[in-house]
Amino acid sequence: MNVVVLTVVNRHSELITGGWSMSVDDAITLLQREGTPAFQIADGTTTVEVSVTPDSDRYFGGTVTLAIGPDGAPEITDDDGLLWASIRTEGTADARISSLIVAVSRLRLATRDMTAALHRIVTQSHGTRQPTPQWLVPWLPPEADTMALAPREKMHFIDAKTPIADGLVNFTAPKPASVAGDTFVVEVAGVRAPRAIAVSWPTAVPRDEPAPMLLYYRPGCGQNVQHGYYVAPGLEPYPWAYDYAFFGMLQQLWYLQDPLIGYSDVGVPYQIAESGKKVVTVLPCNSVGPEFGSFTDPASVLDILGEIQAFAAAAEGLLPASKIGRVALGAFSSGNGFVSRVFASGRGQRHPLLTDHVREVYMFDPPNDVAEGLLNGVLTWARPLGEDAKVRWYSRGLSPHHARVIGKPTPGAGPYVVDSANGSRSAGSIDPLQWQRSIAKATGVPSARALEWNDAHALIAAFLLTHAMDRSGF
Amino acid sequence: MPAIVFLVGTDGTSPNAFYAKAKAYFRSVGVPEPDILSPPAGRTAWSIEGIMLALTKRATEGKVYSEIGIVSHASTFGLSAPLREADDQGTMALSADLQNALAQRKAAAAGALAPASTAAVGAQSDIVIYGCEVGRDPTYLKLLAGVFGAPRSIAAPLRMAIFGEEAGKPTHRLARSWSIPWKGDIRKTTDWVTARKKFTEDASTKYEPDVVPGLGRGDYIAAASGAQADITKPIFFWNDIIPLHFRGRKSAARPELATGDDVSVSTTLIDGDFRDTDASNARICNLALLIKVLPDAVSSTNQAQYERQVFTATATPSTGPPPAGGGGGGGGAPQTGLIERAVDAVVAAGGSRQAIDDLLAAAAPAPAGEPDPADVEALAQAEADEPADDGPAALLELPVAPA
């Protein structure tokens, strides 16, 4: 007889709780459904597929394919959807017992779901919201399991070493920009939000070592519903819908063109690459309703970042590191309010996410209603960490909070991006008119219109991450 | 001889009161109250074993029944009744369970499930299942009859079984049904226009007239029109929950019965259908069912309504498959003890006991800790709905076309 004992574990190699089910193909003669799970392989079988699905909605399942040798010894030939699988066997062709251990993930690859959603563009108006222009379609990443961030020509970045010069924002000369690495999307099991997370993993970051990560919170999306986005008749539900795929993920990931021209894109991985740092981009896609949901809870954030690291390692057939590496939290606009939640609770300040991993916090134009609470939480977190805690705060105007951030008076007028005495903190102020003058100088073309607050708002996200990353401890 | 009826489960909070209405129906047709049996005290469901023990006990008291009715929620996967008394009361008796039980009995394995006494279930006994669509799988019926012993016949409906009320009188009806996997409970939809549209689109894939000649596509489209989750109406949507371990099984279909009918189309569930959880945290698949109650009176002897297997001296109930595994000493196919038997066999063949112990020890890692209640509460708070922020809105903008 040839029996295989099956064990299902999580990425920590712990037996998962809540039970699970398995199904096997026709070559299996019997499942043991009580006690330790096991199945028997019929004589003459050459291949067996075992599908495992945890009862808990916290995990996705997967399938192991076993090749059965002439002596009945099973060998793993594929482990689809699993973090890893291993098998040990003892016996002979007459009698054999094997132990198959499979590790299930809280994530599944969903790049194709996201890229497919991108191509289901919104073709109708919803209130003031206009249909997606058809010219955009050829520029979108094709529907596929992988997503390349295309290289771009003649891109401006902020000069991170000297961000302000001669009273204007100091841009680099136009130059090519590219991201060397894999970009993919995962679906998260067992949460209301974020159920989709985009990840850009630089080639230079090893997948089996503690990974440096930037976790970036985009603005809340509930505010846009009144304008015809995300939730409207005919729009698909979260997360595999055009609005979530485009605004929730792609617009944070890519630069469609030079951000001095179309500055609604954030290009997070491009800005990281420009800074020269090797850091993984993690972009949770928030949802109308729960918004960032579990990603305002430190325990959940740490768990999912660990799952992302394990998932990336598994994709290359590697075992993951036991811990993640240094983490930066970045947020734009109302996204800062959700980061504030992470710091606000007593458990947050004591949680290993903040005490052991988060070492950088970047705040891009936080709204006034969250600014003070956010800063209180961030400074409380930073105090015991000393110079290792990096805090960067950029606004579209002067702010009384800047002096608290850098520990000294700020210049009386902008634009400025100034550091604290030890360089671990920065504060910046660039208002719409200052952006307008700076862009006119950089491009040689005066703006056709007066930039408004929301232009400056977007430009801060589109450019100043490069500065924060350049100053980072990564 | 009189009839006895076993109401396998209880209604709990179920809105359709299936068992209560069934009880009213059998009262109305003259089955004595003491012979309409809800689950015994302390149980939420009769097991098949329990029903057989009860029948055997009653036979010893001189109470023998010609018709043994079993009212149970069911599907083409089987009865929603546990097989053994010790089984979880929420489980179903599947074909594989019946096969294993018969194999164990055939091998005279210790603890094998015994049939009802021949006095209780024998040549005088007709077993009638009142459970949705169980009759679509004649093999299942033969196996179930074999588990009971040697009844004269067993019958089960080909369609959904509905107990209801018409003009104040309890009724038993069958219903046409069209079922497709559905993400969530269709009854909870708040947008019936969209739900109906999606249902009929998905149903067109399954009930495609080109695949099943003569199947009237217009039937389900017409039935869906105006239907909602109102079980008092003759046409309504319903939700069925299928536990994970049915994945990949196909319901039996009876294409020879009626082309142009939903009965001729089987249901196959795949991994991707199982995405939700029910209150017990079990992984499940939701089915959306469009149900159209048929007005005809129902009889278990009507071949258009019931599948009936009649057993004679040459056609007996199933005694189950041969013992699985072969070459293992003819020891049958017990569900437990598989590992122990394998270990013994490997050691007998010269394998290392120590190596096996090491191997099995590695297969028993420490379990993951239960979630900290504080973590659970924090996550629940984190996942609560957020109001749309009322600060300066970061308006979304259409991209600017590259030059």
Image: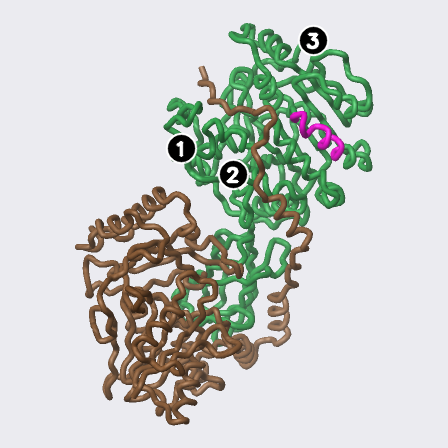
Chain colours: A green, B brown
Q: Amino acid at mark 3?
A: Gly
Residue A128 belongs to magenta span: no
- Label 2: which residue? A184
For the residues beneath circles 1 and 3, the answer to whether they share a chain is: yes
Q: Which mark is residue B217?
A: none
Q: Is residue A407 left or right of residue B177?
A: right
Label 2 crowd (10 A; few <14 / some 14-19 / many >=20)? many
Q: Is residue B64 left or right of residue A105?
A: left
- Label 1: which residue? A119
- Is B290 located above or below residue A39 in the figure? above
> Alpha-carbon distance for marks 1 and 2?
16 Å
* Residue A55 place in picture, x, y as percent: 52, 59
Q: Name the residue located 66 percent from the left edge and 45 percent from the top edge.
A: A302
Q: Amino acid at mark 1?
A: His
**Quadrant location of the C terminus of chain B?**
top left
Q: Residue furthest front?
A: B168
- Is B262 located above or below residue A407 in the figure? below
- The stretch of residues the image draws in magenta is A366-378
| Chain name for mark 2 | A
| Quadrant in which residue B95 is drawn | bottom left
Label 1 crowd (10 A; few <14 / some 14-19 / many >=20)? some
Main secondary structure along the magenta-highlighted residues: helix
Residue B48 visible here: yes
**Quadrant location of the N terminus of chain B?**
bottom left
| Chain name for mark 3 | A
Q: Secondary structure at mark 3?
A: loop
Residues A290 and A420: in front is A290
For the residues beneath circles 1 and 2, the answer to whether they share a chain is: yes
Q: Is residue A415 left or right of residue B304?
A: right
Q: Secondary structure at mark 1?
A: helix
* Residue A58 place in picture, x, y as percent: 56, 53
- Label 3: which residue? A167
